[in-house]
Image (tube, helix red, strand yellow):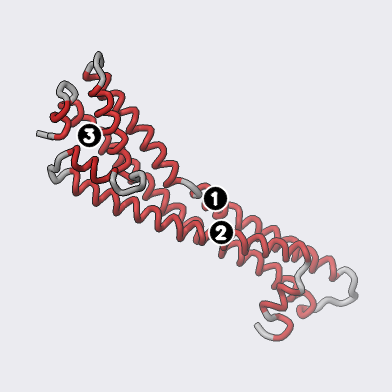
Amino acid sequence: MTGNLSFVTLIWNASIIVQAVMALLLVASIASWAIILRKRRVLNQAISGSDAFESSFWSGGDLTAIYREITTGGRPPTDMAGVFEAGFRAFRRLTAQSGLTAGQIVEGAQRAMRVAQMREMDRLEQSLATLATIGSTSPYVGLFGTVWGIMNSFTALGNVKSATLAMVAPGIAEALIATAMGLFAAIPAVIAYNRYADQVGRLEVRYNTFAEEFSTILQRHAHGAGDDTGDRS
């Protein structure tokens, strides 16, 4: 559009309410894309990290060696390695204590893995609710701006004797911009939320499966001590 119906002119001449709606949607869109990009990096790291850990774990290496490898990096392990680290650390600590049955030792390791998994899931799910909120509310916020702008346009027509399309077009156009901005903010947020929620769900299933399989391994070693914890045979 050109002239009086240029995009910038329409926004500049819009009412305060419509401008506030547009500004809010712009902020929501920027926040949405910031979350999308950050969450993409976090989930990709979690997936690749879990793939690498599973490959190392199921290659038949020594559990103690794997534990030492992931705990000497200077940072607390995350993703599946964090679940393993919490479980194996609890298993070694409980095994060194006297008076505990095999069931108590394994149960303690399972509790530690559940806590580590809950913390990891909380980290992965962080900001997903914000994406869902932006995706579900932005169209309605844009629609509010549209209704307000159209209402102002028709109210202004009541003060003139003869109405023309040229008189009402700018007000309707500026109102529709609010709807377009609402969709612009909502669509990427909804797509990203659905994709990321699916990835988080799949990671949770993988963590649960690993915790169960690792518990079975620990069960076989619960009656041993010391060196027995490092061998999976």
Position in image of residue 173 (x %, y %): 69, 73
Please name the amino acid that badge 2 sits on. Answer: Ala
Which quadrant, please, contains the N terminus?
A: bottom right
Tell me: 227 left or right of 163: left
Position in image of residue 99 (x %, y %): 25, 13
Per the image, label 3 sits on a secondary structure element best described as: helix
Disc sitting over residue 213 in the figure? none
**How far apart, in angstroms, are the residues tagged by discs 1 and 3?**
34 Å
Q: Earlier in the sequence, mark 3 or mark 2?
A: 2
Identify the residue at image location x=70%, y=58%: 144
**How far apart, in angstroms, are the residues tagged by discs 1 and 2?**
9 Å
**How far apart, in angstroms, are the residues tagged by discs 3 and 2?**
39 Å
Tell me: 207 left or right of 61: right
Disc sitting over residue 130 in the figure? 1
Label 2, on which residue?
A: 31
Disc sitting over residue 214 in the figure? 3
Identify the residue at image location x=57%, y=54%: 134
Please name the amino acid that badge 3 sits on. Answer: Phe
Q: Is the C-beta separation of discs 1 and 2 under 8 Å?
A: yes
Foreground residue, 30 or 150?
30
Q: Residues within 10 Å of mark 3 (few under 14, many from 20)?
A: some
Q: Residues within 10 Å of mark 1 (few under 14, many from 20)?
A: some
| Residue 195 in the image: above or below residue 70 | below
| Residue 157 in the image: above or below residue 143 | below
Per the image, label 1 sits on a secondary structure element best described as: helix
Which quadrant, please, contains the C terminus?
A: top left
Position in image of residue 49 (x %, y %): 29, 51
Foreground residue, 232 or 205?
232
Q: Quadrant of residue 121?
A: top left
Foreground residue, 191 or 218?
218
Position in image of residue 88 (x %, y %): 26, 33
